[in-house]
Image: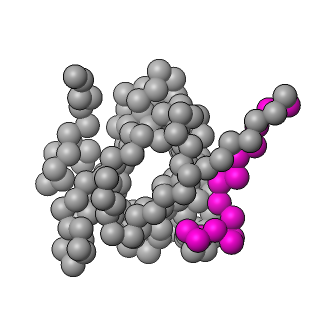
Amino acid sequence: MELIDGVKTKPLRVIPDERGRLMEILRADDPVFEKFGQVYLTTAYPGVVKAWHYHKRQTDNFVVVKGMMKVVLYDGREDSPTFGRVNEFFLGEHNPVLLQIPRMVYHGFKCISETEAMVVNLPTEMYNYQEPDEFRVDPHHNDIPYEWTRRDG
């Protein structure tokens, strides 16, 4: 898959032993590290879609730490070399990856596991309660060329 301009991924290594497991998510010396804003956890129940939105100032760094999510990106930036491109990622317990989502790229996710899925986000900016850097579009009625329905076959 050809990635949307500015999107980066970092495979994560899970280190198991008889006590449990360890997985580093993001380090200050990682090539994908920009800066630290905050860390938060968001979840979705099976089949739930949380989409679409983008940020003007922040870069997101998503890691699905429980369950599985279908994370979808859409490049609506008219000046981008990948304008109009859609990227689809399947992230979580079966595919531990950090997904870096650049500013101005629409994104959303759908829980595709049989239990609640959990996403840790490490955005580059703190959430501003007075002026949120979050611009939303309806998940199903919009100009984004993507359908959230499952494709069997």
Name the quadrant containing residue 86: bottom left
Task: Name the side, left or right, on which 49 lies relative to 35.
Answer: left
Residue at 23% over, 74% down: 81
Vertical placement of 76 versus 152: above or below?
Answer: below
Q: Is residue 102 above or below residue 114?
A: below
Residue 111 falls within the magenta-colored stretch: no
Residue 72: horizontal and vertical position, in percent?
A: 33, 48
Which image quadrant for residue 39? bottom right
Pick the residue in front: 125 or 96.
Answer: 96
Q: Residue at x 85, y 31 (%)?
A: 19
The answer to whether 21 is drawn above or below residue 116 in the figure is below
Q: Is residue 29 magenta?
A: yes
Describe residue 97's horizontal placement relative to residue 84 as left or right: right
Q: Position of residue 87 (x, y in %)?
A: 31, 52
* Residue 116 locus on image (x, y percent): 52, 28
Q: Is residue 9 left or right of residue 75?
A: right
Name the residue rendered at 74%, 41% in the picture: 15
The spot of residue 98 in percent (x, y) is 54, 53
Main structural element of the magenta stretch: helix, strand or loop? loop
Q: Is residue 42 visible?
A: yes
Tell me which segment is drawn in magenta: 19-33
Instruction: Check the picture and name the quadrant holding the C terminus.
Output: top left
